[in-house]
Image (cartoon, coloured by chain):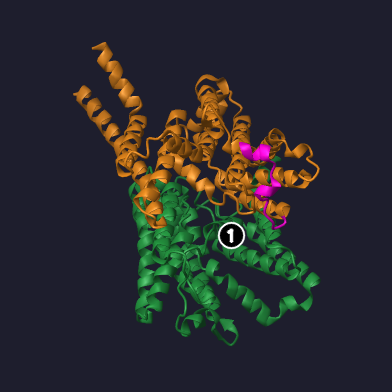
Chain colours: A orange, B green
Amino acid sequence: MNNSSKTHTFLKNNSRELGLIAIIILMTAMLNSQTGGKFFTFSNINNMLSETSVLAILSLGMMTVIITGGIDLSIGASMALSAMVSTSLMKHSMANTGIFTNPYIAIIIAIAVGTLCGFIVGLLVSHLKIFPIIATLGMMYVYRGLTYIISGGSWVLQQNMSTSFLSIATGNILGINNLIWITAFLYIVFFIFMNYTKTGRQIYAVGNDEESARVSGINTKKTLTLVYSIMGAIAGLAGILYVCKYAAAQGETATGYEMNVIAACVLGGVSISGGTGKVQGVLLGALLFGVLQNALPLISNSQFIQDFIRGAIILVSVLFNIILSRRVEKKAIERKEKALG
Amino acid sequence: MNNAPLSQRVIQNKRIFSFKSFFMRWEWMLVALLAIIIGTSVLTAGSNFLSFNGLMSTLRDFMDKAILIFPMMMIILLGDIDISVGSTIALCATVMGVMLQSGTNAFLTLFIGILLGALCGSINGYLISHFRELSSVIVTVSTMIIYRGIATFILRDSAAGSFPSWITKISYGDIGGVPYTLIFFIVECIFFTILLTKSKFGRRLYACGNNAQTSRYSGINTKGIKFAVFLIIGIFAALSAIILMSKMNSARPNIAKNYELDVIAITVLGGVATSGGKGNPIGVILSSLCICFLRYGLGLINIKSETVMIIIGLLLIIAVAIPNLKNALGVPLKKRIK
């Protein structure tokens, strides 16, 4: 009895995640039969996961932002800006193999620039109380403009990047691509951070009700600034990995990427109104997005079918969620009425 | 006085005219900004800036965005947002372009284009008004992807072109030097200013934006208003598609990217609060002129478009930050908008 009720609550609390897992299994099984067993090969899955990793990393940061009830439209631009700063320095020091060709230095510079970008957005949102959608929209213009100015209209190409830097995206440890390791590491860190640390729980509190969080002694301004700075740092990291993966940095890098990230978060069950969202859900959301990206070219070559399905899946999953929660509410009311007689 | 029956009570908070509050209004800031922009442009670019033809062509190039500001303003007044505008424009332009290219009757084409825009808008409107928990960001992000996808499906990488010559006349034709599109925009300005400030619909729109729940309880059809507003932006997106198509004399599926962001920026700069319920049509008209001349003036003195982007972004943030800044410094917050 006790055991069954335990499973019941587990199912109830994780219905969304379980549903996502079911969809992913169904899709991969379908793909596998469609491609004649080519899907479930180690190299394909390795490829697919490394393609998804940039999106998955960004979804983590976006999740924290959306949990506080905000949204960040500037990440595509701050990805481009941080990657451009870092790779431009690399380009200019390539001739004399200066310090900036070191891949670690490149990553650190990108993260620093990204953090600064996020910090500015955070200050605007927390201290000046500008709506996140407007603040990030404005900063998106600024960061994108700066990227163009720094690049001077030219690209940073493969030959301008050091081989040790390029090997980040192509190299692997134990046969598994480096990007996947980085993603896995970040997911573990975030899982602990969001669930078991004080700051992590405070982020949820601020998202649920900013006013009562403030009244109960949480420094909401600090929390908000922190959240956007984390988002910025992650955007910086993702930006440099993105550029490393595609071996080119330009002014247009990652334009509109924020929409994909928001979509992955929403698929993963992060509520746009704030307060709810789980790390494991976001992982599944990003994975589903990755599987889709991998699967859709197999179904049809046309961009239309791919875009259409991508958009439709977001909408349907959100609608499904709403209908489900309405039903739960209705049942709860009915139960109450019954109890009252 | 407060014991009087409700109907006879004098509304207390009717504003008493004072010069200070009159000049503290946001619109004056925009007028000042516009004056600064035009002043510096004239000083740096000389009299070229003020030539009649130059002014008209500047305004003409801006009209495809400008006609969208009122529908977007209405959406932001409701506290919503529409990100799918650019995609709707692209979809309408592609469909109309393909139809024109294959020699379909012109009026039928334009009619179907507008109908298609209305359909796109009403899909957004239906979903957003029917599912109250559904945020407009999510709905319009997904329809943005879908509409652009359909446009890409129809035309692939190619462009539809070779339109009948009268198509270009829509954008480039004029009456005594004043472009048709500008006349249309002026009529639109007058219409929407009256609609928003004097009509029942407009006042209800403001009420919904201030507090949707209270408005619903006091008998306003909030769902209907939300639906109507998204329908209107769909129709105007189709009109913008017609203007854009005639301006470029071609239609491609990747046109009008990021238009929504420019339009939102103009609206917010015009003093429309993103929390909904606050905003003045005059402010939006002024801010659209500001952005238009800013682009033109900076272009004349050879400032790169990237720098213009940065300036617009900063302007947007400063515009929103100023009232909050005053608040943070402890100066009593003046009501920015009546």
Task: Classify A154 as above or below A321.
Answer: below
- Residue A173 image point, x, y percent: 56, 28
Indicate left or right for A284 with A64 as reference.
left
Q: Which residue is mark 1?
A: B266
Q: Quadrant of the N terminus of chain A?
A: top left
- Residue B106 on image: x %, y %: 38, 81
Which subunit holds the residue at mark 1?
B
Residue A299: tell me if it is visible.
yes
Residue sitting farthest toward the bottom: B176
Residue A41 in the figure: left or right of residue A57: left
Q: Is residue A156 magenta?
A: yes
Could you say which quadrant of the image residue A278 lies in? top left
Residue A266 is covered by the magenta coloring? no
Q: Is residue A2 above or below residue A34?
A: above
Q: Which amino acid type is marked by label 1? A: Ile
At a point 45% along the width and 36% down the height, the residue shown is: A43
Q: Residue B188, position in %: x, y?
A: 49, 71
Q: Nearer the viewer, residue A123 or B330?
A: A123
The magenta stretch is: A152-167
> In this figure, what is the number of numbered marks?
1
Whether residue B34 is situated above or below residue A253 in the rendered picture: below
- Identify the residue at horizontal 38%, vertical 45% (top origin): A295
Badge 1: how crowded within 10 Å, few (<14), some, or many (20+)? many
Give me the residue at 61% from left, 53% from top: B336
Q: Quadrant of residue B195?
A: bottom left
